[in-house]
Image: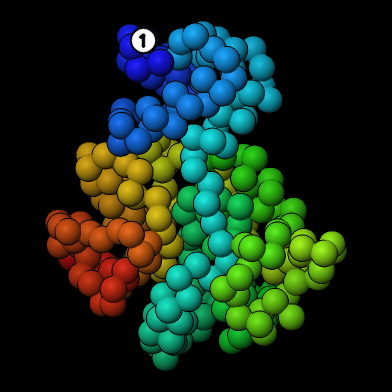
Amino acid sequence: MEAFSDYELFKTKFYSLSNIDLNLYKEKQMKRRITSLVEKYGYSSYCSFLEAIKKNPELYNIFINYLTINVSEFYRNPNQWVLFENRILLDIFRNRNLSDLKIWSSACSTGDEPYTIAMILNKYIPFEKINVLASDIDMEAINKAKAGIYSYRNMKDLPKEFLEKHFTKIESDTYQISEKIRKCVTYRQLNLLEDQYPRGMDIIVCRNVLIYFTEEAKNNIMKEFSEALNKGGVLFIGSTEQIMNYSKFGFKPIETFFYQKVAD
């Protein structure tokens, strides 16, 4: 497949089809992923695969799901969630009501992250006062999130209190999160590289996503995150990420993986 010369044409045509600009993803990594899928389905070139996904909605959805690298777990990197609760949320709670917070879980995948946020918030405020916005580019992932059904491996780091309070075991290794928690999260399809971001956010969570983008794309995303946050708002990123030029975007680090938007 590496000998084929139609990858650039494929990227152009795929953008016209999907509004997903593959030039903004790290090329070596993304091309390797796409090549493996194209070969798996027996196509002889990238563009022949493109023609196939145009005609086959199921294959198109498989490709989008594969492309967007949906890896998610509840309470992933537990120490960071402890900091989120004890340092970020409780600092805010000293000055204002948590039920007034606007929180956005971007690139939320199958919902593990926004539901984690909702469960933490529910320790301090009732269900009906929690509203977390969650977005992802992949509608299949969003539909899985709305169903709220997970295998136990997704919850291996989840505190026992959350598992007992908010989940029902439906099979030997399968659980469903409660309807009360599911109603705390509002889902929206959103492409971080193309679409308009929500505004007036107090907290944005975007973890283990930026690593897949080029520097140009990351800079654009950081600029948009800064504009989406209120002054004093906090951006929570992943354990494999850091913002080297944070001041350029009006941020200051307040804890490892947490950046606060400073006053203009």
Q: Quadrant of residue 242?
A: bottom left
Image vertical order of residue 68 relative to residue 49, above or below: below
SS type, badge 1:
loop
Of residue 150 and residue 189, the one placed in the foreground of this image is: 150
Rendered image coloring scheme: rainbow
Q: Which part of the image, by quadrant, shows the C terminus?
A: bottom left
Image vertical order of residue 134 relative to residue 170, above or below: above
Q: Which part of the image, by quadrant, shows the N terminus?
A: top left
Of residue 70 and residue 93, the one placed in the foreground of this image is: 70
Can residue 67 be seen from the camera position used here? yes
Q: Quadrant of residue 6?
A: top left
Query: Among all residues in the image, which is located at the extreme right?
Result: 170
Q: Quadrant of residue 2?
A: top left
Image vertical order of residue 184 relative to residue 227, above or below: below
Q: Can you identify the residue that label 1 sits on?
A: 4
Percent x, y of residue 43: 54, 12
* Disc 1 crowd, CA 10 A, few/some/many (<14, 14-19, 20+): few
Percent x, y of residue 46: 45, 14
Which residue appears at 40% of the width and 50% of the height? 209
Which residue appears at 37% of the width and 62% of the height? 238
Which residue appears at 42% of the width and 91% of the height? 94
Image mark count: 1
Which residue appears at 49% of the width and 39% of the height? 68
Specify the amino acid type for callout 1.
Answer: Phe
Can residue 122 be seen from the camera position used here? no
